[in-house]
Image: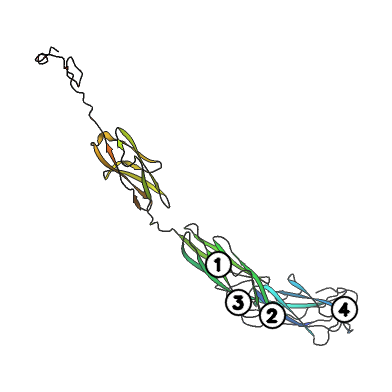
């Protein structure tokens, strides 16, 4: 029981909890409200007129006897000397929507005297504001590098002005509609939430809506999808140049790029694989031209990526100049290639010059 000072305490007050509107939705949230209205006292307990009323203490909770209790709010009195049947109202906020509450009130005078608790009034907390959709909201499968939006609607269900904001966490984000201010019952605001996946994993995050000391929330879910790679690599021959004449062992190279990555490069000689596939840059092989016939040959290269897309370079034509390695016979008395023209006729046939 609230304590009393030496002088007479304030007489008790009468309380009622007024509900307007209906409950919206069945999900639990902390956006519940109760409108409490009570009749102000006019006398002290000794019957003398009350002239120094300062405030009220409004107790509330789910227990059958909330007064006195730990959950309370102090409400200033609009007048120190209430008249007959004068009422005061206060809106309790931040309650659990749909939960039953018990409420009682006491009056306090200027020196701190507190009246006895009023009778208990009971009511179910209704919503101050509502959010739709609720529960789990699936954004579906979204390609990495792209995004998907979902729209939530916040509505004022309790009257007055509802001011608040929405928040969430990556890979979800608030695109528009936050913060919001809703004036009067029925006022609405759309809030757009965006899902931007960065991996193929399934993601989830809480989308919170807070206003006037209460909150509503939904759970956003979605998954990322790998984007199908249909872009082939690009490749060009770099060495040797078209029209070059080559011999011996030469380097054959190419440059290759891909939107995701080059997996390998296979060089070709006249359409037939030349060496093994090269899987890391620099993309090059050596070519022993002595294994090819003399004359013109076509060099090219084919690049592939991990998705199996391939790109083929333009071919370059080169000329192989292999040459003979066999020595010419040596003529006695002369060079290997030039006969001894000073030898008299007939002597050469006898091997004498």
Question: Image quarter for residue 11?
Answer: bottom right
Which-is-in-front pick, marks 2 and 4? 4
Q: Position of residue 112 (x, y in %)?
A: 86, 73
Q: Earlier in the sequence, mark 2 or mark 3?
A: 2
Residue drawn at x 56%, y 72% as measured from the top left:
152
Tell me the residue that label 3 is attached to. 188
Disc 2 + disc 4, Cβ < 8 Å: no
Question: Image quarter for residue 165?
Answer: bottom right
Binning the other alpha carbons within 10 Å of mark 1 as few (below 14), some (14 to 19) or many (20 upward) gives many
Q: Is residue 153 left or right of residue 294?
A: right
Q: Earlier in the sequence, mark 2 or mark 4?
A: 4
Mark sitting on residue 193: 1
- CA–CA distance between discs 2 and 1? 38 Å
Q: Secondary structure at mark 1?
A: strand
Q: Secondary structure at mark 2?
A: strand
In the image, 33 versus 143, the foreground residue is 143
Residue drawn at x 53%, y 62% as measured from the top left:
204
- CA–CA distance between discs 2 and 4? 29 Å
Which-is-in-front pick, marks 3 and 4? 3
Tell me the residue that label 4 is attached to. 52
Which-is-in-front pick, marks 2 and 1? 1
- Count of numbered circles on the image: 4
- CA–CA distance between discs 4 and 1? 53 Å
Disc 1 + disc 3, Cβ < 8 Å: no
Q: Earlier in the sequence, mark 2 or mark 1?
A: 2
Q: Earlier in the sequence, mark 3 or mark 4?
A: 4
Tell me the residue that label 2 is attached to. 122
Task: Name the quarter where the N terminus is drawn.
Answer: bottom right
Q: Position of residue 14 (x, y in %)?
A: 77, 83
Q: Earlier in the sequence, mark 1 or mark 3?
A: 3
In the image, 175 versus 222, the foreground residue is 175
In the image, 303 versus 209, the foreground residue is 303
């Amino acid at each position: 029981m609230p304590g009393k000072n030496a002088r007479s305490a304030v007489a008790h007050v009468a309380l009622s909890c007024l509900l307007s509107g209906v409950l919206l939705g069945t999900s639990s949230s902390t956006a519940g409200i109760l409108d409490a209205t009570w009749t102000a006292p006019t006398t002290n307990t000794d019957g003398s007129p009350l002239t120094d009323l300062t405030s009220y203490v409004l107790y509330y909770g789910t227990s059958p006897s909330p007064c006195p209790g730990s959950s309370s709010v102090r409400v200033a009195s609009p007048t120190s000397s209430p008249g007959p049947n004068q009422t005061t109202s206060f809106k309790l906020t931040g309650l659990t929507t749909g939960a039953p509450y018990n409420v009682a009130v006491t009056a306090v005078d200027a020196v701190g005297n507190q009246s006895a608790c009023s009778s208990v009034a009971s009511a179910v907390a209704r919503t101050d504001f509502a959010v739709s959709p609720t529960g789990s909201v699936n954004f579906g499968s979204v390609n990495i590098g792209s995004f998907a939006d979902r729209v939530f609607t916040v509505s004022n269900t309790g009257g007055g002005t509802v001011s608040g904001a929405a928040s969430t966490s990556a890979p979800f984000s608030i695109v528009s509609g936050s913060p919001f201010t809703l004036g009067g019952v029925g006022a609405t605001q759309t809030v757009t939430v965006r899902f931007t996946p960065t991996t193929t994993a399934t993601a989830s995050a809480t989308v919170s809506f807070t206003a006037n000391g209460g909150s509503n929330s939904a759970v956003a879910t979605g998954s990322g999808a790998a984007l199908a790679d249909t872009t082939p690599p690009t490749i060009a021959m770099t060495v040797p140049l078209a029209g070059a004449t080559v011999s011996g062992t030469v380097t054959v190279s190419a440059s290759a790029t891909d939107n995701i990555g080059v997996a390998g490069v296979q060089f070709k000689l006249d359409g037939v694989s030349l060496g093994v596939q090269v899987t890391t840059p620099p993309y090059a092989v050596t070519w022993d031209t002595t294994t090819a016939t003399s004359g013109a040959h076509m060099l090219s290269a084919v690049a592939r990526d991990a998705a199996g897309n391939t790109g083929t370079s333009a071919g370059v034509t080169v000329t192989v100049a292999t040459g003979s390695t066999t020595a010419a016979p040596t003529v006695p008395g002369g060079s290997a290639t030039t006969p001894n023209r000073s030898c008299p006729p007939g002597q050469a046939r006898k091997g004498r010059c």
